[in-house]
Image: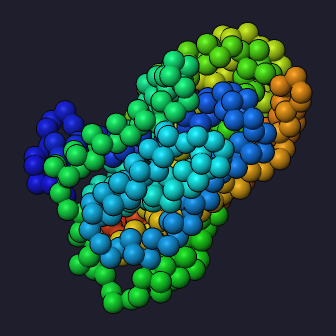
Amino acid sequence: MSSVPKTSKSPFTSYEAFIIAILSFLQFTIILDFMVLSPLGAILLPELSITTTQFGLVVSAYAFSAGASGLLAAGFADKFDRKKLLLFFYAGFVIGTFLCGIATGYTFLLSARIITGIFGGVIGSISFAIITDLFKMEVRGRVMGFVQMSFAASQVLGLPVGLYLATLWGWHAPFLLIVGLCVVAGIAIVLYMRPVDEHLKIQTDRHPFEHLFKTASDWTYMKAFAATTLLATGGFMLMPFGSAFGINNLGLTLEQLPLLYMITGLFSIVMGPLAGKLSDLVGKYKIFVAGSVLAIIIVVIYCGLDITPFWVVVVLNVLLFAGITARMISSSALITGVPEPRDRGAFMGINSSVQQIAGGVASAVAGLIVVQTPSGKLENYPMLGYVVAGSILITVILMYFLDQYVTQKAIASKIQENGSLKSANPQLVKASPEYQK
């Protein structure tokens, strides 16, 4: 980690602030590349003459290819400097996105999404491994808050601009815009990011595929992978048909969508750092539960709506994304505490793959549940809402056991480091069996 002194106003050094900023921007481009398909759905369905099932496959193709490549790369993730890995996969992601920007039909676009997913799906896991290497658990909530804020920023800045460009110059334009942004980010990484290779000092001679198998079959890690599987369900099920549902069921216009995404994103930008800070101060699991309860309530209400005033849709979307943001940030920070240092790259790679594959399955299933009538209206959307709510509820239970494990692991580490339970974080101590005794 950088030796640059911290300022009195910030818990991070100037170099750490750069790392947070560049990883956030990276996430912004990747999330925007995925999210831009959702609002473009209303344009692509008639323009490419495709069905909802085919559109679901376009979305899930990215997820499936990302999941497959993530698994293949996971065994090697701890064998190389993370900066070099980041640049390699980011370059491939740029090429795939460029191909999306010049796609001429459904098959071309589907193939381009597969290429984009092969490279793009690994970048998130590498970023999270870098965060886990460079930042302590006590501040990871805040780091995740800023990095995951890119999700909201893609709505405020990217989606409205993307929709505007799509309306002005066609649906290819948003992808070409993303390519331009990616080039800027890549140059910044090459010039200013330092090697991230401390993990290489504690690696064994284990073969990459043996390393992959050992990590994937670890019982504790498997619990985290199961939680991630269900965490991915909600977003991937609701997102692909969000714009089509808003236009055809809620009565929104195509012109209102950018404003809806922008307002929702602005609130989410505020919620990101706030949720991250609260997860560090109050407890990551507590914030996760609060966000999950809010998400369940809003999902059930929202998916059952018919023609609805625009301001009501805005309020519900803001509340829904507040819950989703709290869940994303707190769960991401909590899960980074699960792997051992020597397994971080492989764990993050497998976890990302599980997330992508689960998201691909969820997106494809959503395409089977939701049916578009000749009038354009989407049917069975309330059923989709109940499925999402159920998955959120089960995830709350799974995350409880992960929280207990991470807490005990942190206490044990403090005791080993300082030789006393009193030296551990007071919140961790109170949650431990040793304290209860």
Is 410 above or below relative to 105? below
| Quarter of the image that includes the N terminus | bottom left
Q: Quadrant of residue 356?
A: bottom right
Horizontal side of residue 310 vs 427, given as left or right: right
- Tally the numbered discs: 0
Could you tell me residue 161's position as x and y percent?
46, 22
Could you tell me residue 275's position as x and y percent?
46, 36
Most distant residue in the left direction? 4
Q: Quadrant of residue 226?
A: bottom right
Observer-nearest of 373 and 212: 373
Horizontal side of residue 277 vs 62, given as left or right: left
Could you tell me residue 142's position as x and y percent?
37, 42
Residue located 66% across and 27% down the image = 43
Residue located 28% across and 47% down the image = 186
Is 255 above or below relative to 48? above
Q: Quadrant of residue 340?
A: bottom left
Could you tell me residue 328's position as x and y percent?
53, 44
Observer-nearest of 140 and 388: 388
Is 307 above or below relative to 285? above
Task: Please indicate, yes or no, whether residue 392 appears anywhere in the rendered image.
Answer: no
Residue located 38% across and 40% down the image = 179
